[in-house]
């Protein structure tokens, strides 16, 4: 499968800065964050439970289908291209630090390239499911950037495995296990799949989780017992 890369010096410098910035913040918050939920504005990695890989993107475009920026999954736990920021859907706002509700529609912004996790009805190159890409400029794209968080409780728990369903295609974010060759050898294809499967469970992994100033109604603040 042919891919085309257009990474310039500026992008390389920007990635290096973001990696340093994220590393510093993660080190500062390590071991001291005791809030259970994923919150608006948080920046995190998403781990696919079945394969143990993390959702990833980079400035490498698909050589077929939409030609948009490719989205893959990688084994590495410390890759700086695997950070995604939780944002409100287009035209709405969510308060930084508020927990994401089960059933809530969100956007997932790729921190390095500033494009949104996206899907549409193009065919994915390996599994022939639906293509998942990164789309838009500076976080502004279209309806294909909207994803529903599917979980069992009231809020998205960091400890819970969840599914993420695209609003336009109604397909789930999925890793079938197919791997690419050069230039992204060993990275796994991420696609949209029409039904729930063990291969489309995800869980919050490493990241910076913004804690709300006040606990949401009905949720006990873990510090109440202190």
Image (spheres, grey):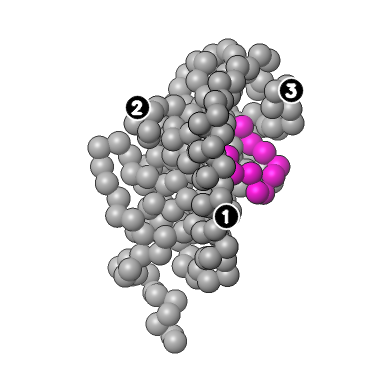
Do labels 3 and 2 touch, CB within 8 Å? no
Where does label 1 land, which residue?
A: 23
Q: Which mark is residue 142?
A: 2
Q: Position of residue 22 (x, y in %)?
A: 53, 52
Is residue 108 among what the camera can see? yes
Label 3 sits on a secondary structure element that is loop
Q: CA separation, marks 3 and 2?
A: 30 Å
Q: Nearer the viewer, residue 7 or 130?
A: 7
Q: Residue at x 51, y 45 (%)?
A: 18
First reached walking from the N terminus: tag 3 or tag 2: 2
The image position of residue 76, as x and y in percent, is 69, 44
Mark 2 surroundings: few (<14), some (14-19) or many (≥20) residues within 10 A: few
Return the mark for residue 181: 3
Is 77 part of what is drawn in magenta?
A: yes
Q: Which residues are magenta?
A: 72-81
Q: Is residue 100 visible?
A: no
């Amino acid at each position: 499968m042919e891919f085309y890369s257009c990474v310039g010096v500026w992008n390389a410098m920007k990635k290096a800065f973001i990696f340093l910035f994220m590393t510093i913040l993660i080190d500062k918050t390590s071991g001291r964050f005791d809030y259970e939920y994923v919150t608006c504005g948080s920046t995190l990695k998403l781990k696919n439970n079945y394969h143990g890989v993390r959702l990833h993107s980079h400035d490498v475009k698909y050589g077929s289908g939409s030609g948009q920026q490719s989205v893959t999954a990688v084994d590495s736990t410390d890759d700086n291209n695997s950070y995604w920021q939780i944002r409100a859907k287009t035209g709405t706002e969510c308060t930084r630090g508020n927990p994401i509700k089960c059933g809530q529609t969100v956007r997932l912004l790729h921190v390095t390239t500033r494009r949104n996790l996206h899907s549409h009805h193009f065919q994915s190159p390996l599994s022939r499911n639906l293509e998942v890409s990164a789309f838009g400029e500076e976080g502004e794209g279209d309806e294909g950037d909207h994803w529903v968080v599917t979980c069992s409780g009231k809020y998205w728990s960091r400890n819970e495995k969840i599914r993420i369903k695209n609003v336009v295609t109604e397909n789930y974010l999925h890793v079938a296990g197919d791997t690419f060759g050069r230039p992204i050898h060993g990275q796994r294809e991420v696609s949209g799949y029409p039904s729930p499967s063990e291969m489309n469970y995800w869980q919050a992994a490493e990241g910076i989780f913004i804690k709300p100033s006040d606990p949401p109604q009905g949720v006990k603040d873990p510090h109440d017992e202190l």
